[in-house]
Amino acid sequence: MTDHAHSVKQVAAMLGIRTHGVLAMIHNGQLRAVDVSIQPGGRPHWRILADDLEGFLLTRTRQPAAPRRRRRKPLNVKAYF
């Protein structure tokens, strides 16, 4: 486990989103974070461990889609009988 922890601002800058987006992911339970504030129950000061951020990014990475097969157009066949 690495000892490096990131602030909410740093994670937001890494992901290219705003800080309230990172806070929303923390509150939804999508992103694990540690509250390092002095007073419990007060305003939280979140820190995201590097391992937790890496795990979050691995769950959010998208696998490339399999190539789609092209459908052939149906033939315009007119029945004359």
Image (spheres, rainbow, N blue to C red):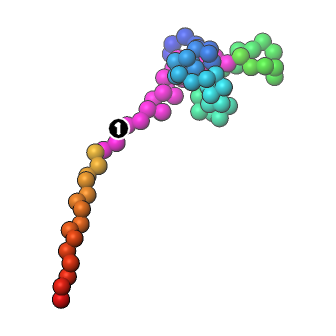
Q: Quadrant of residue 47?
A: top right
Residue 39, image x, y percentages: 81, 15
Q: Which residue is mark 1?
A: 64
Please, is residue 26 above or below residue 80 in the view? Answer: above
Instruction: From the viewer's perspective, tell me whether residue 52 is left or right of residue 44.
Output: left
Residue 26, image x, y percentages: 64, 28
- Residue 77 seen in this snapshot: yes
Instruction: From the viewer's perspective, tell me whether residue 67 is left or right of residue 81.
Output: right
Which three-letter amino acid code belongs to the residue tagged 1?
A: Pro
Q: Residue at x 71, y 16 (%)?
A: 45
Which residue occupies the extreme bottom position in the image? 81
Q: Quadrant of residue 24?
A: top right
Q: Residue at x 81, y 20 (%)?
A: 42
Task: Specify the segment rendered in magenta.
Answer: 46-66
Please, is residue 79 above or below residue 51 in the view? Answer: below
Residue 19, image x, y percentages: 64, 22
Q: Residue at x 48, y 23 (%)?
A: 54
Residue 54 magenta: yes
Which residue occupies the extreme left position in the image? 81
Residue 48 magenta: yes
| Residue nearer the viewer, 10 or 59 | 10
The crowd level at tag 1 (other Cα within 10 Å; few <14, some 14-19, many 20+) is few
Residue 14, image x, y percentages: 52, 18
Instruction: From the viewer's perspective, tell me whether residue 70 is left or right of residue 49.
Output: left
- Residue 26 seen in this snapshot: no
Quadrant housing the C terminus: bottom left
SS at mark 1 in the image: loop
